[in-house]
Image (cartoon, helix red, strand yellow):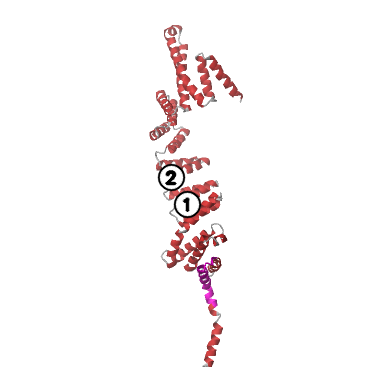
């Protein structure tokens, strides 16, 4: 019996080191869990970081889930969070839970828990991004917004704010990518289309600007800003009739916009549709007496009528003039007098506008208002010297 006992004891001594060799592969995870439960998260972190590089534990869902819990615990701790770099806790916790789900699926023991834990990380990532943005650390903000988006792929807020951060650092390519990502998520807003349009214009990419504008009009067919931009594109490309149809549609959507009537009046003027132009100018002034273009153009309308009457009178032979010339001159004077309040209002709105000054100076002269004519002529001379 004694010999047997000694043999067993010897065998135990010989094999005493073996369990440590085998269990060392999993002891790091065990120690990490024990330290985590004891609140020693710094030590738990050291242990679990060893486990994720060990070939025996790197492929186990439990290893990664434990790592996620430890980093999330540190992140939430007022003490241990100071040992982490900004955003490190969220990033490593996310990586750990994502790896857990990859190894265990969403239905596994640890995978299910990882899914629930990951949802809680969104708020942390988003808040870190906001803090970085407010500190004007835009790269960090974008990184954290993108992380928040990974955590909740269906969420649009983080993607939108990522676009704002990219614009803040003047990374227009990055901003455009985020805005287009939103479009791919069926997210639409007037602001989104406006920003894409403005960025295309800033980059002188007219084709892209036109494309975005058409997309915007499909989404928001009655938006007056998009309709006006579309009108400007048509005007710039010389498609007058198309532009006229567009502005009439815009007026129907925004019937109290004085500027729209003034613009359409100018277009009617170009087409020699004087009566329609006059009606629009009057409507523009009715809606907004301070509409410079409408006031000036009403002055021009009356000025041209006066000039036409005087021209006809000057071309008459003596006999015809004696019969009807005085009437034409009287009509001309009447139209000159009618132009005065419009030109004077336009000059009040833009005191240094040379076209208004010149036109009104001539009207004053034809009406015999010599002092007023000389006053405006002196101002014109002064402006010409500048």
Q: Is residue 73 visible?
A: yes
| Label 2 element class | loop
| Circle number at residue 14 | none
Instruction: Pick whichever, 330 or 122, lies toward us.
Output: 122
Question: Which secondary structure dominates the residues rendered in magenta?
Answer: helix
Total number of numbered discs in the rendering: 2
The residue under label 1 is 158
Instruction: Pick whichever, 102 or 296, lies toward us.
Output: 296
Label 1 crowd bin: few (<14), some (14–19), many (20+), radius 10 Å? many
> How far across and down, in percent of the image, does residue 33 sit?
50, 69
- Does the magenta-highlighted stretch encompass residue 36? yes
Q: Is residue 105 visible?
A: no
| Circle number at residue 189 | 2
**Marks 1 and 2 in Cβ contact (< 8 Å):** no
> How far across and down, in percent of the image, does residue 268 sit?
42, 27
- Does the magenta-highlighted stretch encompass residue 12? no
Task: Name the image quarter holding the C terminus.
Answer: top right
Please, is residue 369 above or below residue 264 in the view?
Answer: above
> How far across and down, in percent of the image, does residue 302 sit?
45, 20
Residue at 46% x, 60% y is 118
- Identity of the residue furthest to the left in this view: 252
Q: Earlier in the sequence, mark 1 or mark 2?
A: 1
Numbered range of the magenta stretch: 20-41
> How far across and down, in percent of the image, does residue 184 sit?
43, 50
| Label 1 element class | helix
Instruction: Pick whichever, 296 or 66, lies toward us.
Output: 66
Label 2 crowd bin: few (<14), some (14–19), many (20+), radius 10 Å? few
Give the CA distance from mark 1 to mark 2: 15 Å
């Amino acid at each position: 019996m004694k010999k047997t006992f000694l043999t067993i004891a010897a065998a135990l001594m010989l094999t005493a080191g073996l369990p440590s060799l085998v269990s060392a592969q999993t002891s790091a995870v065990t120690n990490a869990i024990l330290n985590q439960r004891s609140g020693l998260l710094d030590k738990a972190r050291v242990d679990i970081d060893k486990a994720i590089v060990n070939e025996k534990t790197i492929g186990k869902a439990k290893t990664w889930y434990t790592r996620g819990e430890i980093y999330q615990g540190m992140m939430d701790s007022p003490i241990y969070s100071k040992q982490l770099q900004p955003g490190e806790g969220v990033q490593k916790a996310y990586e750990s839970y994502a790896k857990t789900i990859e190894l265990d699926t969403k239905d596994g023991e640890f995978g299910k828990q990882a899914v629930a834990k990951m949802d809680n990380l969104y708020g942390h990532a988003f808040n870190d991004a906001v803090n970085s943005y407010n500190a004007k650390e835009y790269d960090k903000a974008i990184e954290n917004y993108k992380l928040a988006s990974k955590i909740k792929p269906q969420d649009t807020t983080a993607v939108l704010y990522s676009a704002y951060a990219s614009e803040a650092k003047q990374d227009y390519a990055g901003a455009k990518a985020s805005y287009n990502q939103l479009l791919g998520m069926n997210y639409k807003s007037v602001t989104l289309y406006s920003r894409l349009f403005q960025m295309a214009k800033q980059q002188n990419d007219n084709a892209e600007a036109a494309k975005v504008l058409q997309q915007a009009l499909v989404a928001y067919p009655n938006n007056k800003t998009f309709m006006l931009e579309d009108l400007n594109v048509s005007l710039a490309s010389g498609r007058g009739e198309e532009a006229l149809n567009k502005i009439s549609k815009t007026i129907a959507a925004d019937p109290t916009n004085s500027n729209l009537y003034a613009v359409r009046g100018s277009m009617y003027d170009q087409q020699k549709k004087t009566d329609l132009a006059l009606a629009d100018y009057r409507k523009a002034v009715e809606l907004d007496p301070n509409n410079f273009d409408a006031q000036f153009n009403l002055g021009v309308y009356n000025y041209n009528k006066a000039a036409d009457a005087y021209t006809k009178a000057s071309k008459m032979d003596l006999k015809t003039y004696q019969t009807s010339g005085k009437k034409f001159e009287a009509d001309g004077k009447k139209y000159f007098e009618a132009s005065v309040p419009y030109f004077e209002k336009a000059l009040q709105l833009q005191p240094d506008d040379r076209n208004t000054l010149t036109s009104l100076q001539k009207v004053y002269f034809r009406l015999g208002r010599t002092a007023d004519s000389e006053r405006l002529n002196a101002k014109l001379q002064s402006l010409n010297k500048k």
